[in-house]
Amino acid sequence: MKTPFITALLITLSWSLVNGQTAEDALRFSRVLYSGTARYNALGGAFGAVGADFSTLAVNPAGLGLYTASEVTFTMAPSVASASASYNGSTANDNRLNFGIGNLGLVISNNTAKGNNGILKSINIGIGLNRQNDFNNRVVIHGVNMNNSMMQSYANTLNQKKIDTLALQNGSDPFDLGLAYMANLIGYNKDTKQYFADAAYGGVGQDKTITTYGSMNEMDFSVAANFNDKVFVGLTLGIPSINFYESSLYQEYRVKDTIPNFIAMNYRYDLHTHGTGVNLKVGFIYKPANWVRIGAAIHTPTWYPSLHDQYYSSMQSTFDNSSWNSTQYSPIGTYDYVLTTPFRAIGSLAFIIGQYGLISADYEYVNYSQAQFSAPDDNFSTVNNEISSSYKSWGNIRIGTEWRLSNLRLRGGFGYFSNPYQGQTNNSERYQVSGGLGYRGRHFFADLTYVWARMNQDYYLYDPSMVNPARITNHTNTILTTIGIRF
């Protein structure tokens, strides 16, 4: 029973109906890849039981309770994202440079134990920004299709929907199907009452460039308490914000002389999504002995009450008969809707090796099939069924270590983010390896970290039953620098 939903999902991954939300949108905004400080990244993000780092506000707020002094931190995180796409025997490569901010934060530590013997040792407050995801990337796909074309896929859809030509002329499906018809890329046979395309049997070069940019950042407002240096509890109010842009250009052009009249077509699509959400995070850390720490945290679902999409597209055609040449533009579309992302549960363990170092690990459970769209004026049952039937739960693993050499710190880490898709239809596993150095003085500290990450993805230019996937490998190289002052 899952096959129809998986097929529908793969279509939405690559050829979305531009005036509707897709399962891919839900995954994009549910998959959190924490950035934060250089120290946090150097340990692979395995900080759920370690604490005393500003990034813990976004992961396990109990870590705020391990601070013994106030501090201000700031992290720069420039990165280079490169993508290699293999399609029908051809390979294309591209890369994109991005300058981002990993975090900006303030921690105020209040030692309540001075002058008394109570079990409450301190109450700490933290406020600031942590980056949750970086959308900056560019993918170039290039290949030759000798079997069909996207124009034929449009014709198939029109025949299946049985849309009247007059409706197309009057603005039906104005962002893709209508544009193709009005640009003379799709014809209609009045005798057979069927739509058709010139390149029905392929013989076309196909190129697509997909550029995405923007980020997810979260303002965290946290409070944590230290009870007798044994139990630490914390609470974070998170206010995440989404700012996502996508600009894509798809091109088809004839490479086979037997195609009549048609020379080339260009289809451009632009989307901007933005909005603000809210969530709560609660966590604790327990120290049964000085050499071990146990942590756990729960993140409520993030509720985005008003995500806003703005989108538009255009299509251009070129023919041997220049009188058929045409450029068509869509109106500017807008839509407001609600998104609820899945809850998260994190279990953590850290071993403290005296004054020499530590080893830590986190396991994060998240079920992407729980994401849901809603809107007062729309029924999202179809796409919500795609989400629940096409995604799965498994979890993410983060492992890290840190070793002390006087005022210097040596760090390393590894992260594995599991494939969110059901079955073998797609694999979007992410692997992350990191290493870094740090300096710790009495009132000043600085950290430098390098993070290498790789993720694979299958991308379909249009209907997966017609076209082979483009096999995409994404690599990200990030250098994070954190500067901090204690007071």
Image: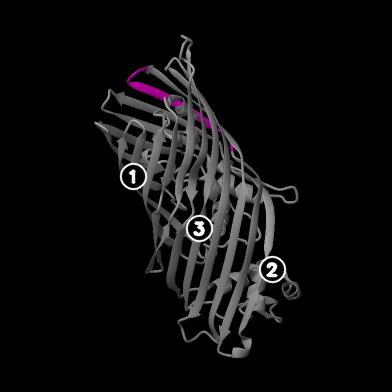
The amino acid pointed to by label 3 is Tyr
- Which one is in front in this view, the residue at disc 2 or the one at disc 1? 1
At 40% from the left edge and 53% from the top edge, which residue is drawn? 78
Tell me the SS state at disc 3.
strand
The C terminus lies in quadrant: top left
Circles 2 and 1: CB distance less than 8 Å? no
Within-10-Å neighbours for mark 2: few <14, some 14–19, many 20+ = few
Which residue is tagged 2? 331
Which residue is tagged 3? 213
Q: Horizontal and vertical percent for residue 412? A: 30, 39
Tell me the SS state at disc 2.
loop
The amino acid pointed to by label 1 is Thr
Between residues 211 and 396, which one lies in front from this camera angle? 211
Within-10-Å neighbours for mark 3: few <14, some 14–19, many 20+ = some
Task: Specify start and end residues of the magenta stretch as a single range.
Answer: 289-301
**Model colouring:** one colour
Residue 300 in sight here: no
Within-10-Å neighbours for mark 1: few <14, some 14–19, many 20+ = many
At 55% from the left edge and 58% from the top edge, which residue is drawn? 245
Q: Which label is found at residue 449?
A: 1
Above or below: residue 485 compared with residue 134: above
Q: Earlier in the sequence, mark 1 or mark 3?
A: 3
Label 2 to label 1: alpha-carbon separation: 46 Å
Between residues 395 and 69, which one lies in front from this camera angle? 69
Residue 297 in sight here: yes
Q: Horizontal and vertical percent for residue 56? A: 45, 33
